[in-house]
Amino acid sequence: MTQKVPKVKFIIAPLNETCNIIYRYLTEGYLQSWCDMIYREYPKLREKLENITDNKIRKKVIYEFFEELFKNKKPLLERKTKDFQSEWNKINDDIMKALSEIVELDWPKKDKEFIARVTLNYICICNIKKRIFDVFYKQSFQEMKETCIHEISHFIYYEKWKQIFPKTKEKEFEPPHLVWHLLEMVPGIILNDKKIQRIFKNKFESYEEYRKLKINGRPILSYIQKFYDKRKNFEDFLKKSYEFIQKHEKEIKII
Ligand SMILES: [Zn+2]
């Protein structure tokens, strides 16, 4: 019997959520390149925040900045949400099936609908547990699909991971834990699989931090790629990759 696959519903990201996320990124130290990306998109925001150290005031400045922008962009956000929805619908079922095949796991029955929020935030966040992720409103169809596939791959990967490593704590799926680092390295490997590429041709890459990282003079991603190419099955790939990054925890944790 063919499995029932989840659908994706596109909505406009609520303004207060967008502000909270941006505030968090610009205040708590995540990957530096992510902060830079937000400022590159919104240089005026950088200027406004430049000399403000008080977090309460920073929050207010961020909120006012995006409130104004949200008002102006509302019609565009509405149109984008509609367009993304109809464009994504064309590949949804095939992608969901391909991801399930790659990870060698059926979609859980509870997974009927994922929420994609079209947002003013350049950084696309993802809540694996709540099955919600963001898509930047300026993205092209190609970029939007790339983001969706990346984030949705996290959902099924997470289910598979919990099956193989049931003792993993929820917080380990977040920075700065090793389990999270591997979760973010893997899309740049598994999404270039033919199973995805024949539906959606695209070069998937892992974050710059991982692409630059070398272990014994060799890019870390080339090791992970080798584990994937030589895997007996997906479980074998995960176990070998995890063992490897645990061994090199020190080098990875400096990111
Ligand atoms: Zn990700």
Image (cartoon, rainbow, N blue to C red):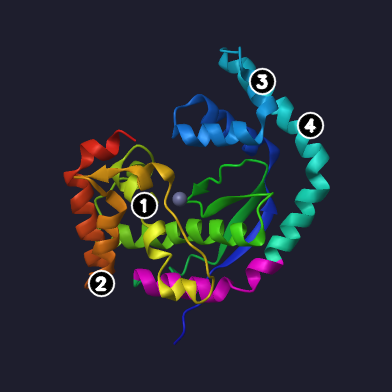
118, 147: nearer the viewer? 147
Q: Residue sitting at 52 percent across and 65 percent down?
A: 202
The stretch in magenta equals 86-103
- For this orientation, the residue located farthest to the bottom is 1
Report which quarter residue 113 is drawn in: bottom right
Identify the residue under disc 3: 47
Report which quarter residue 40 is drawn in: top right
138, 212: nearer the viewer? 212
What secondary structure is the magenta-colored segment mainly?
helix
Q: Residue sitting at 36 percent across and 68 percent down?
A: 103
Chain-order first, disc 3 or disc 4: 3
Q: Residue sitting at 64 percent across and 38 percent down?
A: 18
| Amino acid of disc 2 | Asn
| Amino acid of disc 1 | Met
| Amino acid of disc 4 | Glu
Q: Does the magenta stretch include residue 215?
A: no
Point out the frontmost of discs 3 and 4: 3
Identify the residue under disc 1: 185
In the rendered view, would you say 202 is above or below 57? below
In the rendered view, would you say 155 is above or below 44? below
Badge 3 vs badge 1, beta-carbon distance below 8 Å:
no
Point out the frontmost of discs 2 and 3: 3
Give the side of residue 253 with respect to residue 216, left or right: right
Identify the residue under disc 2: 233
Point out the frontmost of discs 1 and 2: 1
Identify the residue under disc 4: 68
State which quarter of the image contains the C terminus: top left
Total marks in image: 4
In the rendered view, would you say 174 is above or below 19? below
Helix, strand or loop for disc 4 = helix
Chain-order first, disc 4 or disc 2: 4
